[in-house]
Amino acid sequence: AAVRALTAPGPRPTALLCDDDVLAAGACKGARTLGLSVPGDVSVTGFDDLSLASALDPELTTVRLPAEAIGEHGMQALLALLAGRPAPAVELPLTLLPRASSAPPAAR
């Protein structure tokens, strides 16, 4: 999908926001295959803050999710729905971890 986005007609995206760090690693590889520099030509960001994120070159910008809290609140929502009650709305904090795979877009 990243290669498709980077080779589609029209202006090339300056950044790719991937569903998780594994997909972001693949996006970095795809960009390099096309001769693009990460982050010089395209920034890449993932989600999950897997150990893979800091092992890549360049280190991957990622968003840390509170996985335990997501599971806990998801279960509470499911139990509420099963009991015929509305699921409570919850906002959980996310943490952006800026690393070397992201930079301001280059001037065009």
Image (spheres, helix red, strand yellow):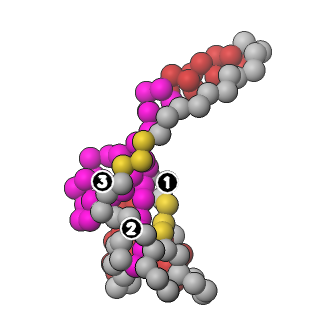
Give me the residue at 49% from left, 60% from top: 17
How many marks overall?
A: 3
Q: Is residue 60 magenta?
A: yes
In the image, what residue type sits under mark 1? Asp
Give the mark nearer the N terminus: 1 vs 2: 1
Alpha-carbon distance for marks 2 and 3? 16 Å
Part of the protein shown in magenta: 41-70
Residue at numbered disc 3: 53
Q: Locate residue 76, reporting x and y percent.
A: 59, 18
Question: SS of the residue at dot 3?
Answer: helix
Tell me if 5 is positioned left or right of 78 in this view: left
Do the residues bearing badges 2 and 3 touch, measured as CB atoms within 8 Å? no
Give the mark nearer the N terminus: 2 vs 3: 3
In the image, what residue type sits under mark 3? Ala
The answer to which image quadrant residue 75 occupies is top right
Alpha-carbon distance for marks 1 and 2? 19 Å
The answer to which image quadrant residue 26 occupies is bottom left
In the image, what residue type sits under mark 2? Ala
Q: Locate residue 8, reporting x and y percent.
A: 57, 83
Give me the residue at 49% from left, 54% from top: 19
Residue at numbered disc 1: 19
Residue at numbered disc 2: 103
